[in-house]
Amino acid sequence: MVKYGKFIKGIVMTKKMTITLEESLIDEIDTMALESGKKKTQIIREALQDYFDMNAVTKTVTEYKMGTLEPIKHSDVRKSLGL
């Protein structure tokens, strides 16, 4: 399950914001909401999370190619996960 926002004792905190989008994007969001049965807010939230995830991957790949990515030992990963 993907979780969004800030957490306070297991509760996801959200904030409202107003954005302006091109009419064509709004039409696509409306269509996706109808076809998927999801709320428009959920579609936008998922799209933003995908965008942020892709940027994180791109940054990691760039750092790897530039040789600036610090490797982590497998044993350290297991230890950090409590395995």
Image (cartoon, helix red, strand yellow):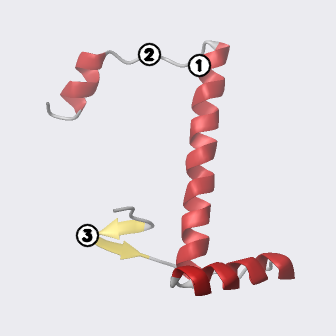
Residue 68 x %, y % = 59, 16
Please give the name of the residue rendered at 54% of the width and 66% of the height, measured from the top-left corner: 46
Q: Is residue 33 left or right of residue 75?
A: right
Q: CA distance from mark 3 to mark 1?
A: 35 Å
Please give the name of the residue rendered at 78% of the width and 75% of the height, measured from the top-left corner: 25
Specify the farthest residue to the left: 83
Q: Earlier in the sequence, mark 3 or mark 1?
A: 3
Please give the name of the residue rendered at 52% of the width and 76% of the height, measured from the top-left corner: 42
Callout 3 crowding tier (Cα within 10 Å): few <14, some 14–19, many ≥20: few
Q: What numbered label is drawn on residue 38?
A: none
- Whether residue 35 appears in this view of the structure is yes
The amino acid beneath tag 1 is: Tyr
Q: Mark 3 touching mark 1, by CB under 8 A?
A: no
Circle 3 or circle 1, nearest the eye? 1
Residue 48 x %, y % = 61, 62
**SS for callout 2:** loop
**SS for callout 3:** loop
Q: Mark 3 touching mark 2, by CB under 8 A?
A: no
Within the image, what quadrant is residue 54 found in? Answer: top right
Q: What numbered label is drawn on residue 10?
A: 3
The amino acid beneath tag 3 is: Gly
Q: Earlier in the sequence, mark 3 or mark 2?
A: 3
Q: Which residue carries the number 1 mark? A: 64
Within the image, what quadrant is residue 1 found in? Answer: bottom left
Q: Which residue carries the number 2 mark? A: 71
Q: CA distance from mark 2 to mark 1?
A: 9 Å
